[in-house]
Amino acid sequence: MSSVSPASSAARPRFRQPCAEDLCVATPFVTTDHTNQDVLEVFTEHRELATLPVTENDRPIGLINRSIFLSQMSKPYHRELYNRKSCIAFMDKEPLIVDAAMSIEALTFRTVEYGEKALTDGFIIASEGRFLGVGHGLQLMRVVADIQAERNRQIMHSIDYASIIQRAMLRASRDALAHTLPDASLVWEPRDVVGGDFYHFVAFEDGWFAALADCTGHGVPGAFMTLIASSLLTQAIEQQGPRDPGALLAAVHRGIKQMLGQADGTDAMTAESNDGMDAAFFWFDNATRRLTFAGARCALFVMHPGEAHDHVIDGERKGVGYIDTAID
């Protein structure tokens, strides 16, 4: 009267992507030759069954919901009328049927598209059209949650490692600052694990160069921008020297626009990137005790000894990079 479909339990390599077959549960099923009396006996024997698949020539054609079936059969005279009739009388003729090889991601989309019925009643799993077993909505939700948790774990692991790289990039500047200006105070606290702000400090025999920058974006996008800008700044110092902050600011500006494809005339709506940074560059000459400042949407606040108020030196009103700024 009822049969049990074997579910695959062979060990699978860990690197294989999960698929619908991993959710396949062996379950009793009936064929179109079985009657509603047979279905009632299966539900009585297997009280844990919420649904009962129906097959024809080993191919799934429907799903009988336990609650709906028992509700119908409990109506007056329904047992006398339907007991000996085919079980297809109360069968859902359009259940969700998926191939065993379907990925979990694709199965999730199919289940959502199919509606609540696929989550409550479950879905039939077949291989080359032949019945294998059933999958349950709750089980699918658990697998999806596990996959998402693993993806999040991998992403956070990558971001944590990116934070190590970013802090290592800044360590040389922090050490040079502490050695050259022991009275200086520097606070760098990214909003996320990695951040879009960076600093740069290099000491030379005749003075020191410093830079503070706030790149567009937070987290990973901002961190990428700090790597780009810091690399361009290091290259500019090697080529031009550290003594002209304005020229270095212009060099980094040109480098960002060229690297990010922000050519003059590019439309902001179609450009792939409209990123850049606000920055302040400094050069201090040891011999003259003179500080040279260049700023892009950043101001310098100066307070002389003995004075009660500071002085503000405004920087340029345009940022470094961005679509709407000229390349020169």
Image (cartoon, grey):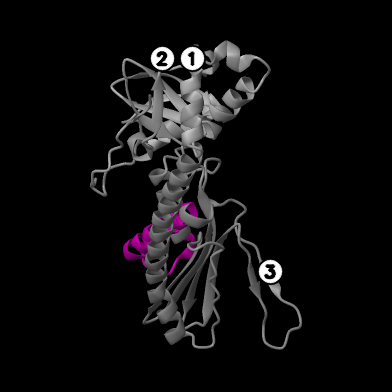
Tag 2's secondary structure? loop
Can you name the residue that lies furthest to the front here? Answer: 80
The stretch drawn in magenta includes residue 311 = no
Given contact means CB atoms under 8 Å apart, are the residues at marks 2 and 3 in contact?
A: no
Q: Which residue is mark 1?
A: 88
Give the magenta-colored segment's residue range.
221-246
* Image point (64%, 23%), residue name: 74
Percent of width and height locating residue 86 = 47, 12
Which of the labelled discs sits on residue 312, or is there none?
3
Q: Nearer the viewer, mark 1 or mark 3?
A: 1
Name which of mark 2 and mark 1 comes first in the sequence.
2
The stretch drawn in magenta includes residue 237 = yes
Q: Is residue 240 above or below residue 325?
A: below
Q: Residues within 10 Å of mark 1 (few under 14, many from 20)?
A: many
Residue type, label 2: Thr
Percent of width and height locating residue 25 = 38, 37
Q: Which residue is mark 2?
A: 32
From the viewer's perspective, tell me whether residue 220 is left or right of residue 7.
right
Given contact means CB atoms under 8 Å apart, are the residues at marks 2 and 1 in contact?
A: yes
Q: Residues within 10 Å of mark 2 (few under 14, many from 20)?
A: some
